[in-house]
Image (tube, rainbow, N blue to C red):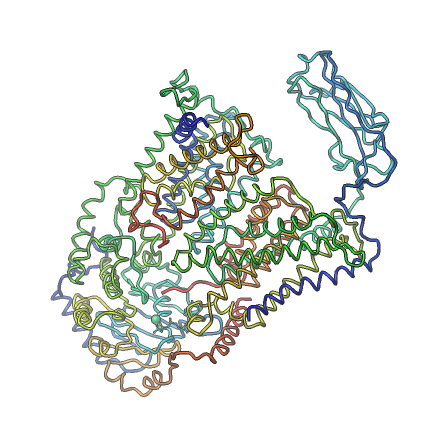
Amino acid sequence: MPAETNLPTNVEAATPEGLERSRAARAALKQVETEPGAKKPDPIVIADNITRTFGGLTAVDVEHVEIQRGVITALIGPNGAGKTTFFNLLTGFDRPDTGSWSFNGTSLNKVPAYKVARMGMVRTFQLTKVLAKLTVLENMRVGATRQRGESFFSAMFAPLWRAEEEANTEKANHLLERFLLIKKREDFAGELSGGQRKLLEMARALMADPELVMLDEPMAGVNPALKQSLLGHVKSLRDEGRTVLFVEHDMDMVRDISDWVIVMAQGKVIAEGPPDSVMGDQRVIDAYLGAHHDTALTFEEEERILAEAEKELEEEAESND
Amino acid sequence: MDFVSLFGDSIQQAIGPTAIVYALAAIGLNIQFGYTGLLNFGQAAFMAVGGYTMAAFVSTWGLSFWLGIVAGLGLTAVLALLLGIPTLRLRADYLAIVTIAAAEIVRQVVGSVSLKDWFGGQDGLQEFSDTFRSYNPFSDRIEVGTLVAWSANDAWVMLVGWTLVLLCCLMTWLLVRSPWGRVLKSIREDEDAVRSLGKNVYSYKMQSLMLGGMFGALAGFCVALRSAAINPSMFATDVTFFAYTVLLIGGAARVLGPVVGSIIFWFLITFLDLFFSQATNPSSGPLIPPSIMTETQASLMRFIFLGLALMLLMIFRPQGIFGDRKELAIDAR
Amino acid sequence: MHVRLLRVSVLVPLLLGVFFALLVSTSGGAQASPAGTSVAPAAVEEPECVKPKERDDDTIHVQGCLRDKRGGGDKPVPGVTITVEDDQGKVVGTGETDETGLFDIPLPGSTIDVLGKTFTIKIDTKTLPEGTALQDPKQVSLKQKINLETDVFVTFPIDDKPEVESDLERALDLAVGGIVFSLCLAMAALGLSMIFGTTGLTNFAHGELITFGAIVAFWVDQWPGDITIGGLNITFVVAMVIGFVASGAFGWLNDKALWAPLRRRGTGLIAMMIVSIGLSIFLRNVYQYAAGANNRNYSQYGNAAPINWGWFTFTSRDVFVVVISVAVLGATVLALSRTRMGKATRAVADNPALSASSGIDVERVINVVWIGGAALAGLSGILLGLTQGFNYQLGFKVLLLVFAAVTLGGLGTIWGSIIGAFVIGIFIEVSTLFIPAELKYVGALVILILVLLVRPQGILGRRERIG
Ligand SMILES: Nc1ncnc2c1ncn2[C@@H]1O[C@H](COP(=O)(O)OP(=O)(O)OP(=O)(O)O)[C@@H](O)[C@H]1O
Ligand SMILES: [Mg+2]
């Protein structure tokens, strides 16, 4: 099955032309202003006026944002900043109240999630979604897009899809090896540890040969040793010529591998720029420090929480009228 | 107590036409619930639409039997579409409620006085089985040993029925080992994940609902043809619940689960029924005094046991009697 | 704290019972003599209609008795002309009812000649005595196929002369019935919705909680002798309160014995749903085992006299049902929004994990919700049984409508379930203006599907969270 994009299907290693392209892209970033909503020389995703409210709460309110092709962009922000919601909106898992956005120049308004994925924009989830009662290998095979055997009528005739299945298995094995899961190949995905699930989800996303990989907190729960090798994998994605957008709370990682950082707080993009400049930005520091921290709740606070829950319920009821 | 006839009759039921009907209905549920995780609680509706379309084509409109079969299958597919469109995008429990509602709608509509001219009201329809029976190769009763015997008509229904069951199982087997089946299983596990991998989840769910519904239509044909009559009481809500019990006994998401389940189910149900009716039979000196259980009450015992069995099965052996707990398809833990 | 919620929900109906008792006693003799008592009214003995003896000739007769049974009486209706026509419309026999109301018309020819033929038996409504009419004015003829070699016995029920009602009056009457039904439905739906909201369980055995209330109340109602306070018969009120409390206890038992252990094991929601189906089948058949399959009625409010109030016509029974259910629904909603337990309930429904971490005893909240939800369901069953009689299938039959109401309103929302119940309940009654009465449930269920098409999350529901 030919891949949709002109990207290399061999994900084993960086390719010369991929490396070349990503180097050029990174160089181009140098000229970009460090302003929220800055224009990029070669954007793969452009979003305008995206808003999404839940009841009374505005979770996302992004005026303008562009993602540069061929680089690693990090999306950071305090808890509840709206990063996951923004991911959901971009990938068609949720519908914004207003706004328009495009991928490779194609408008994605009202495009269903599965079509977005087929276009080459594949995401993972913050709370991992592995297919628990399928083996690791089967999980990987599901990841391949446009399989002939996935249509009802050819499904019953194995010869029609056997060759393709073998090719996919081959590819899956390569990826599993790379993500250190090859020994778990025949295990049920439900038996994997939390970190292994993260890995499996990332590997599975790559089965689709995406042009843009969107990772929601890929490192949460992954052990430090493995983290290093994962960082290498993410970088190698870029070096194959793919674009990576990821959400992460681990600042070391962000500093380490990202070429560009976008900061969200309370639904808005408040800063953008290369990692070092962004982390020194006063607005960013304020956003993080000013953010509400989850603390253990005392017994006396119970009443207050009930009152809040009640208020929320009422607001919801009102907004639903 | 006459245990020999008790066993004989139970075996007769366990492989007789009724078991076929429930095996087919459960094969449909297996596709929908076992593999895709769709909670169709209206399998009775699919059976009714299949059976009634065939019957009405022949006995009301005087059309060909074969046309009736084709139309029956076609209309169940349409029913699946109608039910799927509003619910397949929603959480699983919405489908459950809408399908159970649909089963009631279908049953009340075909039983209504307003449409009596078409569907015969509560009396239902008869006289549509001639074509089917004209192909019957058996002319005499079929006796196996001294215990079990079937009329020529039942034998013919059984021959056709078990062939259908095997074909359906074969089809299920071919499908679930293919990438198509893998997508269904993935949807059962987590449909958002499947969506993120570029599969049109909605379309797959619809295909699953339609296919399972059409297996249900086959069950509907069988139930009508075996008694040469069809009426609304054959499609009560409990029919679907029994089919679920059948599926869960044999083990959901196992190709032969519904067949094994149906055989065991009907053996046990018949056994219990005969046991209690003999135990309370006044003419043979009842084992159980009438002050504790009358004959009418005895006929309820099998359902009391069935309800209990369904609960206990789901709690202690959700993978079915023979299933492997690790491959358990339903989220039961 | 849950004790308070309970006390509120038990006390309110009690108080209301007393209140209503006063209402009845002040409204004078509006209420008819209690029905269901086996003592016949001390009227003049009416001549009985005796079915003629079997003859041994080879003919078949069409026979029947016209009796006027209005108001519990049984009077013969003499002098009414009956004709019998064959399938070509030719009159083959006529007869007139005698002083016992009997008519007896021989069919022409011998048994062989008429066997398998269909005859039409017509009643001449012009010959009916003044003030009487057929119960179903349209049914002036009956078709009868001769299947057996015995005489056939037919009857035409007699009733008041129907007043010609305007569509508006009919709509209002139906609306009254709809509101009464909606209120009963709303209690059951609220119970289901509370349980669903806090536990996520779609409880198919909810119908059996409804039936449970009706059966317990019936059992109390059948205790020999009447319970009276100052000459006022409150047997049913006592039965209702006991049924209500027993239902709450049954809910507690359901949770403690089955659902709480399953939650502790981490049983999945779908698995629990199927367990509830098993429980439903089990309980329904146990009910039938214990109580039989007969239709039952309570000893009071059997045939309450209609009261005219402006454009509306209703009975004291309607008033009773409305007062009780409005009060109980009101008390529940108040309890949910005002009391600590109520707030905790809503917090658990909103986010169980957060509630647990903020010190709410989630299991206890759920247990109280089960008590309250089952008590509401039971009361709903008692009042449904009061308005339309009941048997062991009462709850199973309305379960689908309860589901429809809850789904329509949005699964798990409190207001939604009440609104949904009203949409369904009123629709069912009023729709009979436009569609045949036998299809009214079908209409309601179709509405459910249509609403889901337009507004998938139900009227007040909210969408789910992803990612
Ligand atoms: N379906 C929903 N319904 C109601 N509120 C929601 C929903 N989804 C998100 N929110 C709210 O929107 C806000 C943004 O949530 P989001 O999950 O996007 O944050 P985030 O930036 O991903 O946070 P984190 O870093 O903790 O993952 C939060 O306040 C959250 O409570
Ligand atoms: Mg997030």
Quadrant of the frame with the C terminus of chain A: bottom right
The x and y percentages for residue A225 are 17, 71
Front residue of this view, candidates C224 and C379? C224
- In the figure, is residue C273 to the left or right of C120? left
Front residue of this view, candidates C26 and A114? C26
In which of the image's four quarters is ligand 1 placed?
bottom left
The x and y percentages for residue C214 are 63, 50
| Count of numbered labels shown in the rendering | 0
Front residue of this view, candidates C130 and B283? B283
- In the figure, is residue A315 to the left or right of B266? right
Q: Which quadrant of the structure image shows residue A268?
A: bottom left
Front residue of this view, candidates A306 and B13? B13
- In the figure, is residue C316 to the left or right of A237? right
The x and y percentages for residue B250 are 35, 41
- In the figure, is residue C30 to the left or right of A321? right
Measured along the vertical axis of the image, is residue C441 above or below residue A313? Answer: above
Q: Which quadrant of the structure image shows residue C356?
A: bottom left
The x and y percentages for residue B215 are 40, 37
